[in-house]
Amino acid sequence: MAKITIKELESLSANDAGLILREDGNLAVRISVRRDGVPVSFFYRYRWGEQNKEYACGSWERQSLTDIRKARNQVQALI
C-alpha cells in the first residue's frame, strides 16, 4: 500500500462519501459529507485480544498528515 498524499485528499468530493482509503501501518481514512464540506477522518485500526478496534488520529485540514501519522505512531508504540 502506498502512502496517502495531500493531492489525493484534495481530489476527494462528495461523490466519495463512504470511501475508506488505507496506507501502510494500518492508517485509514474515512470520507463523509457534511454541509460545510467533505471531512476526512483518519483512524488507526488494531487488534486488541479478539476484537478489532479503531483509534481516531485526527482529521485532515485541521491537522497535517505529519501530525496524524505521529498520532498513529504514538498509539502503535503504546499497543
Image: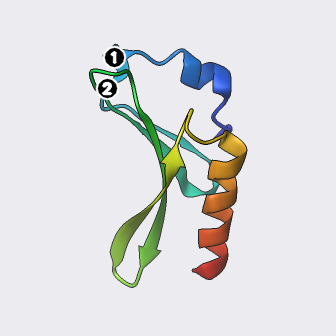
Name which residue lies at 28% across and 26% down: 34
Amino acid type, callout 1:
Ala
* Residue 68 vertical placement versus 13 (above, below): below
Specify the quadrant that holds the N terminus: top right
> In the displayed image of the protein, which residue is found farthest to the bottom?
49
Between 4 and 2, which is closer to the camera in this rendering?
4
For this view, does 73 lie left or right of residue 46?
Answer: right
Q: Do the residues labelled 2 and 1 touch (CB within 8 Å)?
A: yes
Residue type for callout 2:
Ala
Q: How crowded is mark 1: few (under 14 residues within 10 Å), some or many (20 or more)?
A: few
Q: Is residue 38 left or right of residue 35?
A: right
Q: Mark 1 points at which residue?
A: 14
Residue 64: percent from left, percent from top: 66, 40
- Please tell me how many numbered marks the rendered image carries: 2
Q: Residue 44 carries which label?
A: none
* Secondary structure found at label 2: loop
Would you identify the image quadrant in which residue 20 lies?
top left
Residue at left 66%, top 26%?
A: 6
User: Is 48 rendered above or below residue 39?
Assistant: below
Horizontal side of 54 relative to 68 (left or right) equals left
Quadrant for residue 52, please give it: bottom left
* Placement of 71 over or under 7, stated as above or below: below
Q: How far apart are marks 2 and 1 (CA)?
A: 6 Å
The secondary structure type at the circle numbered 1 is helix
Residue at image coords 33%, 16%? 14
Sort mark 2 into few (<14), some (14-19) or many (20+) by Cα contacts within 10 Å. some
**Where in the figure is residue 69, as x and y percent of width and height?**
66, 52
Q: Where is residue 25 in the image (x, y as percent from the top left)?
A: 63, 57
> Could you tell me which residue is drawn at 34 percent across and 81 percent down?
50
For the C terminus, the image quarter is bottom right
Residue at mark 2: 17
Please tell me whether residue 37 is drawn above or below residue 78 in the rendered image: above
